[in-house]
Amino acid sequence: MALRDLTAAEQVAALAAGETTSLELVDAHIAAIEADDVEAFLAMDADGARARAREIDALPERPPLAGVPIAIKDALSTRDIVTTSGSRMLEGFRPVYTATCVQRLEDAGAIVVGKTNMDEFAMGSSTENSAYKNTLNPWDHQRVPGGSSGGSAASVAQRQVPWSLGSDTGGSIRQPAALCGIVGMKPTYGAISRYGLIAFASSLDQVGPFARTVEDAALLLRHMVGRDPMDSTSLDWPEPITLPTATDLAGLRVGVVEELMGEGVEPGVRAAVDASLKAIEDLGATVVPVSLPSALSGLATYYVLAPAECSSNLARFDGIRYGHPVEADNLLDQYELTRGQLFGPEVKRRIMLGTFALASGYYDQYYGRAQRVRTLIVREFAQAFEDVDLLASPTSPTVAFPLGDRTADPYAMYLADVCTIPVSLAGLPAISIPCGLSDGLPVGLQLAGPAFSENRLFDAAHALEKALAFDTRPPGLAT
Amino acid sequence: MIDENTVRHVARLARLRLGSDEEKVMQQELSGILEHIDAIRAMDLDGVPPTTHVIAVENVLRPDVPRPSLPREEALREADDVVDESFGVPRMD
């Protein structure tokens, strides 16, 4: 078996047993990236990664993740490594500090090999809004990897790294995980510090792991959760994240969200999800229908709230403190020209939409109402969790779509996140695991739980993963 | 449907200079998206309070103790125009 085929947990074990070195692992994964034809990375730190690997190989005592390579979404700041968030606005930008979550992983011994492609400022569902390039789906190079964390998802599916970090505002981890046939997890809002995550919509943004197994996702999350003085929304974590061990689901009550199983869900996706619900029952769980009446209003609510927050967060980008301004004679012209020229079309659309929703005369009708619909959605989830332990739905209503298919119609692109957005609005944890194929393309199953139910989610997803035995290797990938 | 003047007004508020073609496309696209969003304007929300925070946290304070901040040369390191150890900007009219 090639080194790049090992899961992160297997790499940890192989290193501990002296069967390989960190330098060998880093070299093998960098070679896989360099032989790449899916365009997952925006920047590499091959020299830095090799230097770190040599240091770690020389340590007498290894930290827990010592020597295992990882890729980081370009929305996360990494000191001295160019970080663009997929935007021309930050071309060449070298942060002066490293995001807390990345720092925690480096402290645990993980080795950052590079930064991954993404939709500009995490706005999009296909990674086609990157200002730099398209990333290709490892299962079919004519199709998108999903987004916005498309590079992080593709790099793990393509076995260029065993795991990676993404960020999820309305589905930007779960949806690309589903489209690339891997595991993606968005934890409870506040689980992981957002310090160093370039902000999109602060009430929704969460960092989370991509991996090829549920166990690896848990292992990565374990080293990131907990309070950070630099993010006042980060939480003291109530219990350690444990590695999942469940082999059955006896006694578990799983609700199937009726509103997310209907119109718009492709037949092939529906079939794979139905088959995995059957597998959940076979493992001993009870599966019952659940109604979240406001779930389908989530999309409209999100497309008020997220743009409103982004219009405020992105006000900081003016080319003055970082980036490069478009020259002008006075400050106002410089602001407007710089922002008009360096933001891409989707980012401008969202800033406009958000500014509109917050503008005098429109605020109550849009932003105010959306915040109240959000309350309904929060309440409906709370109500549902009085009767069931977890909720199941498709992660994405469709499999990976062809490149260019939805770029001309912004709302068609927004529909890609219809199943993931309600969970985001309620701040709840959710995981997407690959549950089957439709016409040769992966389908994702989303499991969501109450706040802080990460351990239960991982356990259930792990037992189901073993039962489904999905092969995460894309068919074209050389062995 | 939002009109051209609204698009110009909002672009000005957002500090975005749009070309005239861009304004027209923006008007169409925003109007299209708002048609979908309008669904929430018809919902019965009587007595429903707005969400302020999804996970209850209260009064998060740090100790009121001075700490080192970003050194000046690091803060200025990425700036395009540095003047007298400060960020340079064009004059304000």
Image: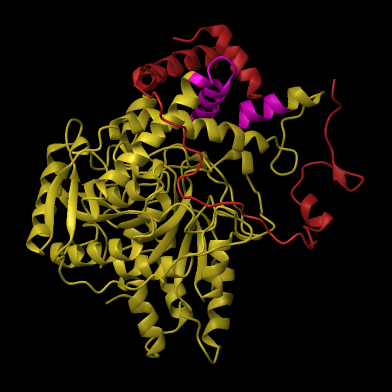
In percent of width and height, residue A14 lies at 36, 84
Question: Which quarter of the rendered picture does the C terminus of chain A lie within?
Answer: bottom left
Q: Is residue A213 visible?
A: no
Using the image as rendered, state which of residue A318 and residue A391 is in the foreground.
A391
Of helix, strand and loop, which mostly describes the magenta segment?
helix
Q: Colour of chain A?
A: yellow
In reply to whether residue A268 is colored magenta, the answer given is no
**Which residue appears at 37% of the width and 88% of the height?**
A19
Question: Which quarter of the rendered picture does the N terminus of chain A lie within?
Answer: bottom left
Using the image as rendered, state which of residue A391 and residue B51 is in the foreground.
B51
In reply to whether residue A339 is colored magenta, the answer given is yes
Using the image as rendered, state which of residue A343 and residue A218 is in the foreground.
A218
**Which residue appears at 84% of the width and 38% of the height?**
B88
Against A396, residue B33 (above or below) is: above
Q: Is residue A33 visible?
A: yes
Against A424, residue A162 (above or below) is: below
Q: Colour of chain B?
A: red
Using the image as rendered, state which of residue A320 and residue A276 is in the foreground.
A276
Q: Is residue A222 left or right of residue A180?
A: right
In percent of width and height, residue A43 lies at 54, 55
Residue A296's image quarter? top left
Question: Magenta segment, which residues?
Answer: A335-364
**Which residue appears at 39% of the width and 44% of the height?**
A426
